[in-house]
Image: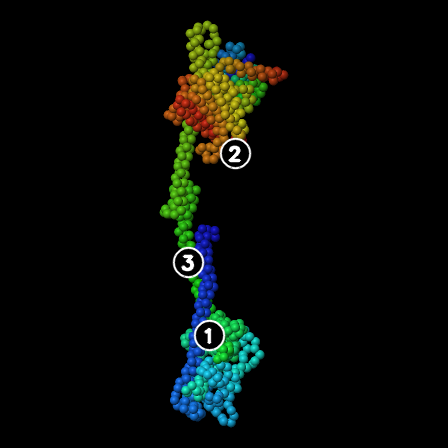
Amino acid sequence: MFYSTRSKLIASFLGVSLLVGGVSLFIGGQLLYKAVLSEATNRVRLDLNAASEIYQNRIENVKTALSITTLGLGFRSKLKRQDSQELFNRIRRVALHANLDFAGVTTSDDKLLCRIGANPLSHDAPQPVNPLASLALEGPGIVAGTMILSTEMLAAEDPELAYRARIRLLATPRAAPRAEKMETSGMALCAAIPVLEEGKILGIIYGGVLLNRSKDIVDTVRDTVFQQEIYKGHSIGTATIFQNDLRISTNVLTPDGKRAIGTRVSKEVKERVLDKGERWTDRAFVVSDWYITAYEPIEDIFGERVGMLYVGVLEATYADMRRKALTILVLITLAGMALAIGLGYVLAHKIMSPVHRLIRASQQVSEGNLSPEIGPQSKDEIGVLQNTFKDMLVSLEERDRHRRAEAENRLLQSEKQASIGRLAAGVAHEINNPLTGVLTFTRILLRSKDIGDKNLSHLQKIAESTVRVKNIVKGLLDFSRQTDLDREPTEINRLIRAVISAMENQALIKGVSIQFNSGEDLPMLTLDRNQLQSVLVNLIINALDAMEHGGNIMISTGISLSASDTGKKGVEIAVTDTGCGISPEDLDKLFEPFFTTKEVGKGTGLGLAVSYGIVQRHGGTVRVQSEVGRGSTFTIWLPVEEQSGKDEDIGS
Amino acid sequence: MRILVVDDEDIVLESCQAVFELEGFEALLVPSADKALGAMKNNDFDLLLIDVKMPKKDGMYLMRKIKEQWPDIPIIVMSGYYTTETIQEAIRMGAATFIAKPFEPDELIKIVRQVIEKEERHGKKESPRN
């Protein structure tokens, strides 16, 4: 069952679909995913650019807000007069509008005039001046950018800020080890603008935004860049601002759902981005999960790398995509396999049904039905097979018909022979008794001396005629007698040589030479030597009779396969003469009893019939080829008996 | 030399008698097996010439009977219709030889003499049965 063509076809279809499915799974799982990942990486890189833009914008905002403030006429006059209270009011308004965490004004000799912090100006002690303002004074010029402010400075600006900036370091997997337990300084976006009049610095206005724990920039990035794409309840995009390797402003969440402030970047990223100052775009471990990330270093006003900007997309969303794609591919493969089985089944049926019909047909043929139903003609190779099968049927039928005709012929022949045999027996019995009388008394009369020459000649004629009758009856009896074969293993060449030497004298008288071309390595035949000898003698006598004026008789032997019984091995004995030949109309009647072309009294017309019977009883055949005026060839074919058959024949 | 000839055909009997007479043999002719057995009881013969094919009781039957009572007497079997088997059976049953009908007078005499000579060579020690 499992070896049937149908299963083979289905198996090969399955194999193909499995291969295709496997390849597409591989491509889908590996190449496609890589392509998607690189696409995602590209996107994140662009997102980082956008985030960077937002970051720079914020700095620009601060700068712009402060710049606009300096342009007001009132502001300058107040600054010239160093009207702290008024200046305070003004910068507080600005800070409110521009969302500044701190702002202040210093004099041209680097003394603080006012600041907006919760720790307003007290005149008890000199206030520390923000280094930003000093920087702008030294510049001179506008200073804007990122800056690290110490906890003291922050406290000076506003104790609240110092408190906000304090961040406890949390243990983070894959982060580089760090000794501190707490970050106290803060990172700010800030700007300081000198207020000039006629080339002279009147003072400095400065202000800034503390990034620590701020949600402003990172959420803007998330909301504008990732447009609130949600995966499993969380935005897929995240953004972070690092101070050094510490997350100070982020919307990456810890496993318990809080913003991951206080966690740190992985060691690989730190080394690449912070230490070497390169960009990072690759997958990276962020807090507790894998993200497709982009990092770039943040440099402060002095060009020092003080932190990093990060955007990232949760890799799980892509893994999920891959899982979905793989699922679909698996489903497609399964569907392909189901289709393969179905298709294989249908195709196998389509291909195999004519073959099955042929198989059934050949079964019918083997049961004897030579015109089985083959079914409709196919147009493919099966069609060729069908045609060959039909041809085979035709030739089988022909052979069958031929064999039947032969068998009928044989039957007819043997019936004929049997009836002739019965007739001959009766005739012989009845004739031989009176013939005994005729022969006896004629001979007795011939012995007496006183009957006269004339009577003597008459009597001689009677005697001759009687001998002729005797011979005819004997021939009849020979023909009718189905005597059993007395077989013994015989060397056919030797037998033929014996016959030739017996016939040589007779041939010499007629001026005929007999040649023998003996075949080599002939197998032993089991024959009735006497009967076969008489067959050969008969053939040679016939040949001699056909040659009135001398000639040649050529006898040859050789191994030959049977012409009628396919493939059966045997020995052929050919007797060829150079005599008068046999006319085509006589050829058909040649083996019939009492058919003779010899002169009256010379032949009984039984010799060939008897010879034919003897050869037939040996399982052999006699063939004649003849051409009038050139001669005839009688070919006897005798089978080589198989070992088993030989035993049977000897036994019978 | 006394020969008993058994055949249902008169012409055969007469032919045999004519041939034997010429040769100086004494022939007794009988047409059937029963008559032959009767003749055997009353006469001594040197040889029997028996036809195989006779109506009612044939030559084979006769030969069997004769071989039962007179096993030493040589028998020649003759027939106009014969097969190898009939010849073989006759020989097996004790016939000295076989002669096919029609035969030439010389042929018959030659065979008879051969049989007698052979019989004399082999059976000289035993006196003919009375």
CA distance for labels 1 and 3: 46 Å
Say whether marks 1 and 2 touch (CB < 8 Å).
no
Q: Chain of mark 1?
A: A
- Pick whichever of labels 2 and 3 is earlier in the sequence: 3
Quarter holding residue A92: bottom left
Residue positioned 41% across, 47% down in the render? A355
Labels 1 and 2 in the same subunit: yes
Q: Which mark is residue A311?
A: 1
Element on which disc 2 rests = loop
CA distance for labels 1 and 2: 98 Å
A340, A290: nearer the viewer: A290
Residue positioned 46% across, 90% down in the render? A114
Residue A86 image point, x, y percent: 42, 92
Please name the amino acid that badge 3 sits on. Answer: Leu
Q: Chain of mark 3?
A: A
**Residue lying furthest right:** B125
Q: Which of label 2 and label 3 is nearer to you?
A: 3
Residue A368 image point, x, y percent: 42, 41
Residue position marked by numbered label 2 in the rendering: A642
Please name the amino acid that badge 1 sits on. Answer: Val
Residue B69 image point, x, y percent: 57, 21
Residue position marked by numbered label 3 in the rendering: A339
A260, A56: nearer the viewer: A56
Please name the amino acid that badge 2 sits on. Answer: Glu
- Pick whichever of labels 1 and 2 is earlier in the sequence: 1
